[in-house]
Image (tube, rainbow, N blue to C red):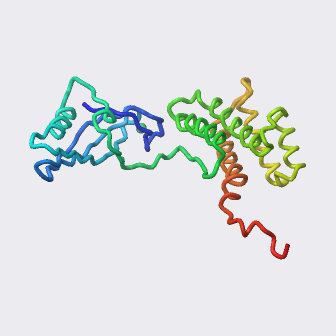
Amino acid sequence: MITFGYNCPHCGVVNGGFEVRSFYENKKHDNLSIFSLLAICNTCDGSIISDIAIFDNGIRKEKIDGFRHQLNHKDYYYNLYEVYTGKIKFFPDKQNNINIPQYLPDSVEEELMTAEQLFADIKLKPNYLKPSGNAYRTVLERALCELSDNDNQARLNKRIEKLFEEGKLTIDLKNFALHIRSLSAEASHTYNEFTQQELEELRLFTQLFLQYVFTLPAMIPDESKQVKGS
Ligand SMILES: [Zn+2]
């Protein structure tokens, strides 16, 4: 049996366990076999497939025979990434639940990845609701920290007001950030009910905020940033 970890495109579990349950060996040539693998997610039972070509350059077909043997073995678990070191592409490959906008500062991207991974696990672990909400709040804090040149002393609302006064946030973005702050405050209070719907709103607003302040400005060509005639 061959097993491996993968971010499931069906249930969104991050690095979930998969088992190769079935395969078809297409013997293209004496020294080349293409194995079509069908793997099942241990969490949701959804399936993914992949084609893996195994090539032997000697007369003895050690690699091909070895891979087939490992697939057929009933009592021992081999890790796919150890028995095959080439690049593997699975279908479907859409990792539904992880959304990282482009051009984020590294520190913001890192925090957002944490929040997105917690969010992706919500279906399986409902107790991740508040940790996920808190993680999006940290993303906002990180983003504001980047915008204010790492002045991380002030409280969140103070920092938002300061960025507005300095002209780094427009009035709309200021209100946007304050809204995210109030949504995330719900998550950070242990005595509050924090719902899935509130988390989804918090996630959407955080994503949009990041796109406004980091992604869009990075996508605008330099010449468009200069006001005409100035
Ligand atoms: Zn799954």
Q: In the picture shown, does residue 93 fall above or below 81?
A: below
Residue 42 appears at what percent x and percent y?
A: 37, 32
**Front position in the image: 41 or 135:** 135
| Residue under the image location 53 percent in, 29 percent down | 125
- Viewer-closest of 214 and 15: 214
> Ligand 1 shows up in which quadrant of the image?
top left
Q: Where's the N terminus, which quadrant?
A: top left
Give how far across and how far down residue 228 sits, in percent. 81, 74
Q: Residue at x 78, y 44 (%)?
A: 179
Q: Residue furthest right?
A: 165
Q: Position of residue 65 (x, y in %)?
A: 14, 37
Give the residue displayed 52% in from the left and 34% down from the top. 121
The outermost residue toward the front is: 58
On the picture, is 228 further left or further right than 11? right
**Residue at the far bottom in the pictured view:** 229
The quarter of the image holding the C terminus is bottom right
